[in-house]
Image: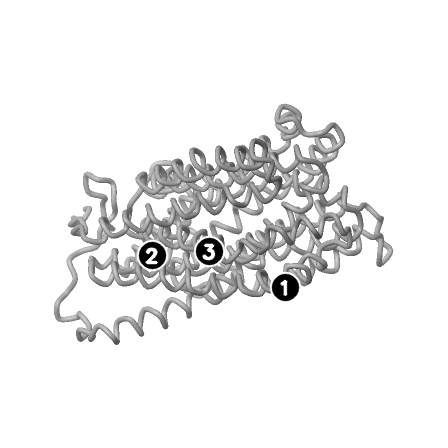
């Protein structure tokens, strides 16, 4: 068993020189990191994409059923998504500390990270369920039209039922990813998407003998699927091969104290992600003030941005694990290399993914709606994606590298500046003062993403030059 030093981090024993691998030449190190990055990132990306593909299916099915229903569902997702992503950020420490334990080959410590995190996960889930349940007042005070406030508030209540499940799934997935075992999470996500496709269509349109519920049917489908995913992955962790080695069934006694390091890492990550998603939710509410067409167009464009962002998130999560493992074995040069490869690879991949949207914005828009007014507005913002995709994806990779290296609050401050003090004012000014409409909101995103990726990259350059703290053993 190990103990945290005075700075609160958990450290491995000094590496055994006799067990150290033969040093690699720089080009081999790069190849190794790229290989490991994509090996881990592929299933993680599929799992992250699956989370959003369900929302994309909701958007397509509801958008083709009713444009007003699409606007209601998009607005309802604003507080739900903001709180869910905040919760995911609060649980980020599970993946980071698990990867640190893997780097030290301390399997009991890795298992205790998961055990201590589970009660904390349920506590957060119940709190965020209550807050999402009360979302209608937020729509009223932010000036949403009466019909949007009422209908979106009703949908938010339905979505809130799936909140605890989303976070239970996340904790289990983060634990497995920290161990570099992401395949179970990917498989569960694929199964969930197949079920979602059938159930979503059935409940929205009233097919297969199911009731016709419109946008409400999509909301119910989301909550049912989230609980299905959570229970399946939770069951897997409890019975997985090697669960005795990890002490998975050793109980939850002392979970609050035991989860301290994971919680402290999560507080910073949760604040960071919460501010970012809240800022994007504010932009959604700005779009709602412009009317149903603007809200629907913003929702479609953000769905595409979020869909591709899941690719960046998969690469970023893999970057965090690779950096965390190097940090756990106190290999600073390898930690720095892992971070820079993750950042540059993510930006290149994201730029490539933006090209089809730039070249065929009309075709993409037609997938979501047949309303010519919504299509025209959506096309005007999709052409900005070659700027937004690389910078937004790059900032996520950079912040994940910093989290893997144990950096807590500096990335949060940079997110605060970029998304609260830059994006929201810029988006408001360009949209309402310069009369740019929805396009002004996305130019605000462009500006904020550039600020974020530059600031976070500079921060990683500083952190990656520092010595990794020494560790002591606990009796």
Q: Residue at x 53, y 58 (%)?
A: 308
Judge the density around disc 3: few (<14), some (14-19), many (≥20) Cα neighbours within 10 Å.
many
Residue nearest the viewer, comparing 55 with 199: 55
Q: Disc 3 on helix, strand or loop?
A: helix
Does label 2 or label 1 sit earlier along the sequence? 2
Residue nearest the viewer, comparing 135 with 182: 135
Q: Disc 2 on helix, strand or loop?
A: helix
Residue 242 percent across, percent down from the top left: 41, 64
Query: Which disc is residue 233 wearing?
Result: none
Residue 62 percent across, percent down from the top left: 75, 50
Report how far apart the C-alphas of labels 2 and 1 lie in the structure: 40 Å
Where is mark 3, residue-wise?
A: 313
Where is mark 1, residue-wise?
A: 360
Where is mark 2, residue-wise?
A: 99
Tag in front: 3 or 2: 3
Does 184 appear above or below 262?
below
Q: Residue at x 75, y 45 (%)?
A: 215
Does label 1 or label 3 sit earlier along the sequence? 3
Q: Residue at x 33, y 64 (%)?
A: 341
Residue nearest the viewer, comparing 44 with 10: 44
């Amino acid at each position: 068993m190990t103990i945290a030093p005075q700075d609160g981090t958990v450290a491995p024993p000094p590496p055994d020189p006799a067990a150290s691998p033969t040093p690699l030449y720089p080009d081999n190190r790069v190849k190794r990191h790229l290989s490991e990055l994509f090996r881990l990132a592929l299933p993680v990306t599929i799992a992250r994409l699956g989370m959003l593909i369900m929302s994309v299916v909701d958007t397509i099915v509801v958008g083709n059923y009713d444009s007003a229903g699409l606007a209601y569902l998009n607005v309802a997702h604003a507080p739900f998504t903001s709180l869910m992503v905040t919760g995911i950020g609060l649980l980020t420490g599970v993946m980071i500390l698990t990867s640190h334990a893997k780097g030290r080959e301390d399997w009991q410590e890795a298992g205790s990270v998961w055990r201590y995190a589970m009660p904390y996960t349920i506590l957060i889930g119940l709190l965020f369920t209550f807050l999402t349940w009360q979302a209608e007042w937020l729509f009223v005070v932010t000036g949403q039209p009466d019909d949007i406030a009422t209908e979106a508030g009703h949908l938010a209540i339905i979505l809130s039922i799936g909140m605890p499940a989303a976070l239970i799934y996340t904790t289990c997935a983060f634990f497995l990813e920290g161990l570099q075992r992401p395949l179970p999470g990917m498989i569960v996500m694929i199964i969930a998407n197949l079920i979602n496709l059938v159930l979503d269509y059935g409940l929205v349109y009233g097919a297969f003998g199911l009731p016709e519920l419109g946008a409400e049917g999509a909301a119910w489908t989301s909550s049912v699927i989230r609980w299905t995913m959570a229970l399946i992955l939770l069951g897997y962790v409890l019975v997985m091969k090697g669960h005795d080695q990890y002490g998975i069934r050793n109980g939850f006694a002392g979970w609050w104290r035991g989860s301290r390091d994971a919680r402290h890492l999560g507080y910073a990550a949760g604040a960071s992600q919460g501010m970012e998603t809240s800022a994007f939710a504010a932009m959604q509410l700005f779009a709602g003030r412009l009317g149903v067409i603007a809200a629907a167009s913003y929702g479609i464009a953000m769905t595409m941005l979020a869909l591709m962002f899941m690719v960046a998130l998969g690469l970023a999560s893999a970057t965090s694990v690779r950096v965390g493992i190097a940090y756990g074995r106190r290999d600073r040069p390898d930690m720095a290399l892992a971070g820079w490869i993750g950042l540059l690879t993510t930006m290149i991949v994201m730029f490539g993914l933006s090209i089809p949207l730039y070249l065929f914005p009309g075709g993409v828009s037609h997938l979501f709606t047949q309303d010519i007014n919504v299509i025209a507005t959506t096309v005007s913002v999709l052409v900005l994606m070659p700027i937004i995709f690389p910078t937004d994806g790059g900032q996520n990779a950079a912040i994940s590298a910093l989290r893997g290296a144990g950096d807590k609050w500096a990335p949060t401050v940079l997110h605060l500046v970029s998304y609260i003090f830059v994006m929201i004012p810029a988006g408001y000014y360009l949209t309402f003062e310069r009369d740019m409409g929805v396009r002004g909101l996305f130019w605000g995103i462009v500006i904020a993403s550039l600020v974020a990726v530059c600031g976070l990259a500079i921060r990683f350059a500083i952190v990656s030059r520092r010595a990794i703290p020494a560790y002591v053993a606990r009796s």
